[in-house]
Amino acid sequence: MLHISARQTFERAPRGIRISRLIVFRYGLIGSLVLPPVLHHLLTTRLAKHLCRPTTIEQVPINPFSLSLSVRGLKVNELDSSILTLEPWHSILPKDGEAYAISEAGFPER
């Protein structure tokens, strides 16, 4: 039985396949590990600036392969020190791909 290491398998693949593997790997790495902290920082600072209120976000998970983005634990402090929590809204887009329209009362409508 011939033992082939992963490195040998990678080196045996044609050059185009190796390049496409690296592109997909880097896309997944950047999209799932690098972008969430960057977006978390940008969203927190820009929301606080535009709303003129302190805001906090627990996490911003991104799945680059399904092109999904969620904002979890968004909290906006009111001027009277109360906190507006938007916990039920776990994602910007629902699973079926239709966007929500926000009514004047602040509830999502389909």
Image (cartoon, helix red, strand yellow):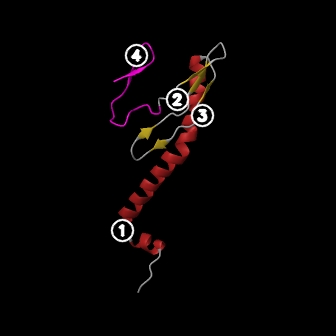
Q: How far apart are marks 3 and 1 (CA)?
A: 40 Å
Judge depth for marks 4 and 3 and give the one in front. 4
Judge depth for marks 4 and 1 and give the one in front. 4
Q: How far apart are marks 4 and 1 (CA)?
A: 54 Å
Q: Measured from the top left, where is residue 64 in percent x and y?
A: 43, 45
Q: Do the residues labelled 3 and 2 touch (CB within 8 Å)?
A: no
Mark 2 sits on what residue? Answer: 87
Magenta region, residue range: 90-110
Q: Are marks 4 and 2 in contact (CB under 8 Å)?
A: no
Question: In the figure, is residue 31 to the left or right of 100?
Answer: right
Q: Measured from the top left, where is residue 36 in percent x and y?
A: 54, 41
Name the amino acid type tagged 1. Pro
- Residue at the image position 52 percent from the left and 29 percent from the top: 87
Judge depth for marks 3 and 2 and give the one in front. 2
Q: Measured from the top left, where is residue 2 in percent x and y?
A: 42, 85
Mark 4 sits on what residue? Answer: 103
Q: Between disc 3 and disc 2, whose residue precedes?
A: 3
Query: Which numbered marker is on residue 41?
Result: 3
Label 1: element kind: loop
Q: Does the magenta stretch include residue 95?
A: yes
